[in-house]
Image (tube, rainbow, N blue to C red):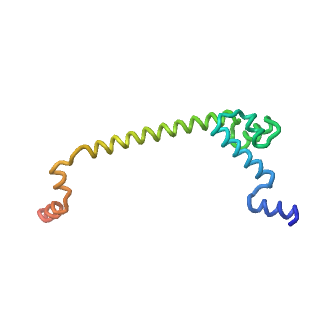
Amino acid sequence: MSLTSFHRHFRAVTAMSPLQFQKRIRLHEARRMLLSQKLDAASVSFDVGYESPSQFSREYRRLFGAPPGRDAAQARRERIAQAVSHAVRACLLNETVSETVSKPASETTIRQNSPVFAETRRNSRS
């Protein structure tokens, strides 16, 4: 397959050139590294193959809408807020479930919810 043919087929499948695809993969890997490890943008840019931290920062901002440092800090804050929200929700659900389980149903409630009681009530209304 010729180089031109490869580029044409690649673009048809991915809607981007091989170089754009490679940049996108590098930038997504850089974002993953920034979020999972406490590294600065310059070292991450070198780790993913950029020779210029300023070029990396410019392309990162273009793809993700914010510079690498600010984007990573924002994403970390969102993750923390989401984790806290899930923890609070889980605590509230556990309290609600334990309150419901710990309160015994009254005899009247049990009788009213039984199928025999429902059938008796229907017949008495007729």
9 shown above or below 102: below
Q: Which residue is located at x 67 percent, y 41 percent?
A: 33
Q: Which quadrant: the C terminus?
A: bottom left
Q: Is residue 10 above or below residue 49?
A: below
Q: Residue at x 82, y 62 (%)?
A: 8
Left or right, 89 with respect to 29, comes to left
Q: Residue at x 74, y 58 (%)?
A: 14
Does residue 63 appear left or right of residue 93 in this picture? Answer: right
Res. 87 image quadrant? top left
Which residue does the image show at 83% across and 60% down from the upper left?
7
Residue 107 percent coordinates (x, y): 15, 50
**In x, y percent, where is residue 9?**
79, 64
Q: Quadrant of residue 12?
A: bottom right
Q: Is residue 55 above or below residue 12?
A: above
Question: Of all residues shown, which one is farthest toward the left?
Answer: 124
**Closer to us: 37 or 56:** 37
Up the image or down, 91 lies above or below 121; here it is above
Number of marks in picture: 0
**Image quarter of the N terminus:** bottom right
Which picture quadrant has residue 36? top right
